[in-house]
Amino acid sequence: VSSSKQDVDLRPWLDSLPRKFTTPIHWKPQERKEWLQYAHMEESVQRQEASWKDIFGRLQSCTTSAASRMTWGDFVWGCESARSRAFSGGYTGAPFNPFIYVFTLVLVTIYIGLNLGTLEQAANGAALVFCGSVLRDFVLPKFFRNQKYVICPVIDMCNHDSLMTTANVAYEFFANAYSLSTTGSIQSNTELFISYGSRSNDQLLQYYGFVEQDNPHDIYVMPPLREWDIAALETACGGPFATGRLQKLDRAGLLGKSVDDVAAVDFTEEEDSKSEDATSEGNPRGGVVLSRSVGIDPAVIQALRALVSTEEEWQEAGESIGNFAAQVNPENE
């Protein structure tokens, strides 16, 4: 197996790839339940498995006989090899092509040399070419937030460390190549670490098969508020909550969703980096997010303040949940 350049043999790199993975998608449902003891993580892996099975089924139904002979195990191995080794960044359009600018310079020279127009007109034409190139390669890709995913042999072997990153990966536009550069002086025979991004241990375990001690980006997703023991909360607060308060939170989307509500949504169409985190894609039930950096989700704190507020506090806030963003008083807090 070779790359587009005939003198580059990719077989040694392919031979270095792991033969198997032990990520949670390979665990049996009962093993996930026993080993994770974490409902949010179980549901995330279930969504991942459903998405990949949907893609696998479509691949087998519409491609060549070679692809139809691919087993589910082969498909998962390929997905995990690509998923765990690829890195991404903003797409910068086509690679740098000096021919465009050389050709423009030749045309400008001919234009001026033959007295076909003024120098100002020639400069305007050259500026138009330059602006068009910048628009195509930098502005439009960023505007549409296009992503480019790349597997680069050797660079893909770098491990992740959130706290001790010693190297950065970058695309060199003018060289049309990828670079791995150190962030400081590195001792000989020392491993280089890059960052896979601001990934929680949930993401690292699910897609890479490891967790990171003292991960600054770690989160824990609790069940949504609608699954909390409301009766116990009322007991702790000294009495039942005001009528209609829970319904108000529900209409504002602060109670989260039930399992049945989420089951009716199709998550198989989009499996990208966004679906890993605690956004609506990675946390479709609206679970309560605890993070190292922020603590409990401020929106949940706001909802709880409104829920346990007295009728007087509720009226003073104009019956608006948004007015509970700040602390009401020590008793409410």
Image: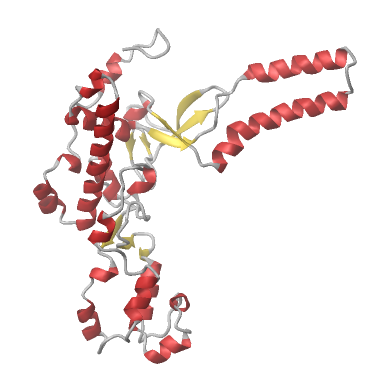
Work out which quarter of the rendered image holds the N terminus and state it: top left
Q: Quadrant of residue 22?
A: top left
Q: Residue at x 17, y 30 (%)?
A: 73
Q: Residue at x 87, y 23 (%)?
A: 119
Q: Residue at x 21, y 47 (%)?
A: 46
Q: Residue furthest bottom?
A: 312
Q: Residue furthest front?
A: 61
Work out which quarter of the rendered image holds the C terminus and state it: bottom left
Residue 199 in sight in this render: no
Q: Position of residue 64 (x, y in %)?
A: 27, 20
The image's colouring method is secondary structure
Residue 117 in sight in this render: yes
Asked whether, in this view, residue 250 is left or right of residue 17, the answer is right
Q: Position of residue 328 (x, y in %)?
A: 43, 83
Q: Residue at x 23, y 43 (%)?
A: 50
Asked whether, in this view, residue 250 is left or right of residue 97, the answer is left
Asked whether, in this view, residue 147 is left or right of residue 122, the answer is left
> Camera-side residue: 303 or 176?
303
Q: Report the number of discs.
A: 0
Image: 102 above or below 308: above
Q: Position of residue 130 (x, y in %)?
A: 70, 28
Image: 278 above or below 96: below
> Camera-side residue: 274 or 329?
274
Q: Residue furthest top?
A: 7
Q: Position of residue 311 (x, y in %)?
A: 38, 90
